Image (cartoon, rainbow, N blue to C red):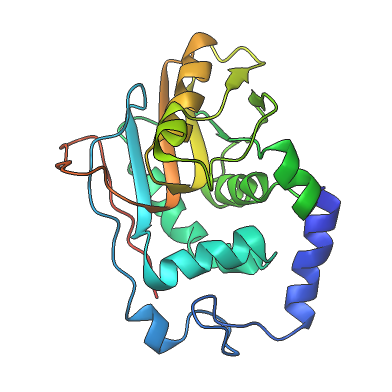
Amino acid sequence: MLVRAAFDDLLTIVLPHRCPGCGRRALALCAVCAATLAPAPAAPPPAPVAWWTACYAYAGAARELVARAKYRGERHAFQLVVPALAGAIARAPTPVDVVTWIPASPDRLVRHGVDHGEVLARAVARASALPVAALLRRAPGPPQTGRDARARRAGPTLRGHRDVEGLTVLVVDDVATTGASVAAAARALRARRAAAVYAATVARTPAPGSDSSPGAYTPCRPSN
């Protein structure tokens, strides 16, 4: 899968890039779309996630950026946010020991042929000079996208398959909406004796009525 991803990414170097927001030809976000980006609003992380960060509010051009990378194979869109995520991770409360990701559902792997979450996590780890490892396994079931609110809040069924005793693990994902996926990942990793679990996402929507929690959220500072 990673070989295919590398080949696809090579094609994006050869072929013209397009703005992830509107599709116009551009090396990055065009000025019009960049002006619509809003920082992710601060909110306390879902237990047992100890700290999290996100680049953008999940709306407008940021939502389209994620959609193009996630559903249309335009993974170069993530290159715009990897440096910002790496910068925020460097300001985490304690050093991160290892980076991981939430595995895609089997159905999504069949449809897209690659786990875009893994591609993103490996890029963030590389930019942060951190080790990366597949620490989670996902039980068969549908993806979070498209499920009703109650099902989304339950999150995917995940389990850790490697011992991470005493380590601070960073879970990288594209979007946090209810926070259920990163919370499920954190529970699985804590069950494998992780000392702490952090999360970093490209975009995030706040929980209704949530307030910022000092020390639990660090904003990214993307350069547009």
Residue closer to the observer: 5 or 122: 5
For the question of whether residue 66 can be seen, the reply is yes
For the question of whether residue 166 can be seen, the reply is no
**Quadrant in the rendering for residue 27:** bottom right
Residue closer to the observer: 72 or 190: 72
| Residue located at (39% from left, 37% from top) | 179
The x, y position of residue 194, in whole percent, is 48, 15
| Residue located at (23% from left, 42% from top) | 43
The x, y position of residue 48, in whole percent, is 36, 21
In this picture, residue 215 sits left or right of residue 129: left
In this picture, residue 36 sits left or right of residue 171: left
In this picture, residue 69 sits left or right of residue 83: right
| Residue located at (73% from left, 75% from top) | 12
Total marks in image: 0
Residue closer to the observer: 169 or 176: 176
Residue closer to the observer: 223 or 105: 105
**Quadrant in the rendering for residue 161:** top right
The x, y position of residue 109, in whole percent, is 75, 45
Q: In this view, does 80 lie above or below 194?
A: below
The x, y position of residue 9, in whole percent, is 75, 66
Position of the C terminus, as image quadrant, is bottom left
**Quadrant in the rendering for residue 19:** bottom right
